[in-house]
Amino acid sequence: MSSQVQSGVLEKVQDLLPNQIGTNRAWATESVERHIMNADRLVRERTGNLYHQQEITLANATLEYALDTEFIDITSVEFAIDGSTYDWYLRPITLDDLDKISLSWRDDGSARPEFYTLLSTPGLPSCKIQIYRPIATVGAQTILVTGLGIGTTTTTCPDDVQNKCHVPHVMSVLLAKKSPQEAASWFQQYIAGCEVVRRRTLSRHSKGTLKIGVGW
């Protein structure tokens, strides 16, 4: 498990249990961290997923970027204009759709990319991601690619999965003695959250369905 998962889940649990985790408090930090490690293992077993993330620094007027070979599927691509605040999701698109938008799409530019497409299959050494529209003059802009992965370094986990799966499991364990009914409710949230995440990977977005409307 990566420090990203441990620190992320710990922060979320601390928000739910303010001033109750730490030295001389209801739960020691080390104890909660052990529960997080166990939750991470159980979540990955139940959902069957390993996650991988790659942050890519954009270059001037550049369409294509190499992807890590750990990827076996891409689930999201986010954009940060300042290199750290990811508040814009790119939408998947096909090369055919790009031709429908603009026959000169390779030469188009914008202040921020709107779409992405994959060149080759994730996991192959030559796999690349292509963004549209590229930025003519780049400052600190980056994209964050998240997806399913394979390999010993694949240990990251998106925040929404932590909220749906890790946090409910940890809360169910911590509250098991203090409030069994509340703990049971958290455990049901964990089961439901894992099912949502598992089904998400079984249902891929359809390709080539972008509707081209007036104004493109």
Image (spheres, grey):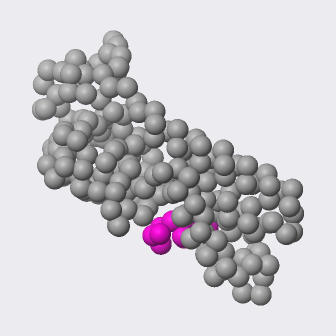
Q: Position of residue 9 (x, y in %)?
A: 59, 64
Q: Where 146 falls versus 216 (above or below)?
A: below
The image quadrant where one finds the C terminus is top left
**Figure check: 196 above or below 214:** below
The stretch in magenta equals: 1-11
Does the magenta-highlighted stretch encompass residue 2?
A: yes
Q: Is residue 100 above or below residue 128?
A: above
Label count reads: 0
Q: Is residue 196 visible?
A: yes
Residue 183 horizontal side relative to residue 136, left or right: right
Q: At x 34% / y 57%, what residue is drawn? A: 150
Q: Quadrant of residue 64?
A: top left
Answer with the quarter of the image where residue 212 lies: top left
Q: Nearer the viewer, residue 156 or 37?
A: 37
Q: Residue at x 70, y 49 (%)?
A: 189
Say which quarter of the image contains residue 117: top left
Locate residue 105, reporting x and y percent. Answer: 17, 28
User: In the image, what residue occupies the spot 63% across and 82% down?
Assistant: 30
Residue appearing at x 58%, y 60% in the figure: 42
Magenta segment includes 78: no
| Residue situated furthest bottom in the rendering | 24
Viewer-side residue, 22 vs 195? 195
Q: Main secondary structure of the magenta part?
A: helix
Residue 60 visible in the current orientation:
no
Q: Considering depth in this image, is 39 or 22 the residue closer to the camera?
A: 39
Q: Residue 103 at what x, y percent from top left?
A: 14, 20
Q: Residue 46, how many percent across, how many down?
A: 56, 52
Q: Is residue 61 left or right of residue 76?
A: left
